[in-house]
Image: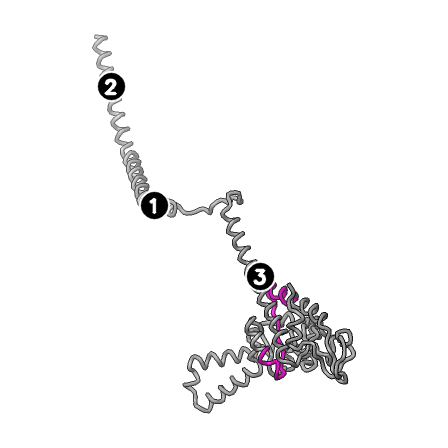
Amino acid sequence: MALVTLKELLEAGVHFGHRTKRWNPKMRKYIFTERNGVHIIDLQQTVSQLQKAYNYMRDLAQNDGTVLFVGTKRQAAPIIVQEANRCEMPYVDKRWLGGTLTNFKTIRSRVDYLIELEQRRDRGEFNKLPKKEALKLNEEIERLQRRVGGLRRLQRLPDALFIVDTRREDLAVKEANKLDIPIVALVDTNCDPDPIDLPIPSNDDAIRAIKLMVGKMADAIIEGKQLRETLEAEEEVERAAAGESPTATWTPPEERPEDELLGPSTLAKLEAGIGSDEAEADANMSNQPEKKAETAQSDAGESAEEGAKTEESNA
């Protein structure tokens, strides 16, 4: 089944480009025709490129990749926020901060500072501060939320960028190209598709068109995450089954102390038995000299009796 139909694209106005005088000649291969001074995008190529982008995003999410959504124009910003949150990805919906990618360590430190301030506020620490200082910190939170609030989920450099209107977001494109981060983007007839790894020819001004295309990218990411969870669950079941299999490799049990293997009553009996045996042995050892003396006396008596009998016989 097709990811999207031509009818859906037409209804969303995806096929409308810019006026012919504003076009970028590098977009020629994606243009179908001209009508009333406006370029019409070839929707067959839109469907093809959208499918490629969908597969790429799905596979990336399945491998636990991160996609940074970027769209700061008035029509795109609220859609970017909504769809990025739906698929749990970071986003930039306000002005792109220079160094967001190339100076990521500094940007991340500002995000961490924002999170720290929010936690302090939620714990009620601001209530213990002077009003002027608390007000200043609240204003700082609002400022950071506007500038870096969408980057909370970005713990490291993203594995890909998804951009709406590459002409407007040219700084994001340059930073991603510098770091060899792949870019998937909606490119209108006034954009340069060359710096984009996966360009999707589309109207990037109409709200319905933006919502349709951005929504498909979010769907791809959600599907990829679900596939990863399913695969992990299956692997867990296989590992559990392998552990219970009778043909599994036998490993000798670890040696355990006797007091863990034998019960307390058994140990008590053994100790009692060992104690009585030792006492009997000691008693035997102490009685040995007495037995030797008794034996010597009996031997001497027997010798005396034999001597007396011998004398009597001689007489």
- The amino acid beneath tag 2 is Glu
Indicate the quadrant where residue 11 lies: bottom right
Q: Secondary structure at mark 2?
A: helix
Q: Is residue 74 magenta?
A: yes
Which picture quadrant has residue 71? bottom right
Give coordinates of residue 178: x percent, y percent: 71, 75
Residue at 49%, 89% (x, y): give it.
Answer: 136
Q: Of 193 and 14, which appears nearest the observer? A: 14
Pointer 3: what residue? 227
Q: Which residues are magenta?
A: 56-79
Looking at the rendering, in which quadrant would you find the C terminus?
top left
Question: How many numbered circles does the render carry?
Answer: 3
Percent across and percent down for residue 215 are: 60, 72
| Label 3 vs 1, first from the N-terminus | 3
Q: Earlier in the sequence, mark 1 or mark 2?
A: 1
Q: Nearer the viewer, residue 218 or 114?
A: 218
Q: Depth-wise, is mark 1 or mark 2 nearer the camera?
A: 1
> Which quarter of the rendering shows the N terminus?
bottom right
Density class for disc 3 (Cα within 10 Å; few <14, some 14-19, many ≥20) is: some
Residue farthest along the bottom direction in this orientation: 132
294 shown above or below 267: above
Residue 263 - label: 1
| Mark 2 crowd level (few <14, some 14–19, many ≥20, 10 Å Cα) | few
Percent x, y of residue 127: 41, 85
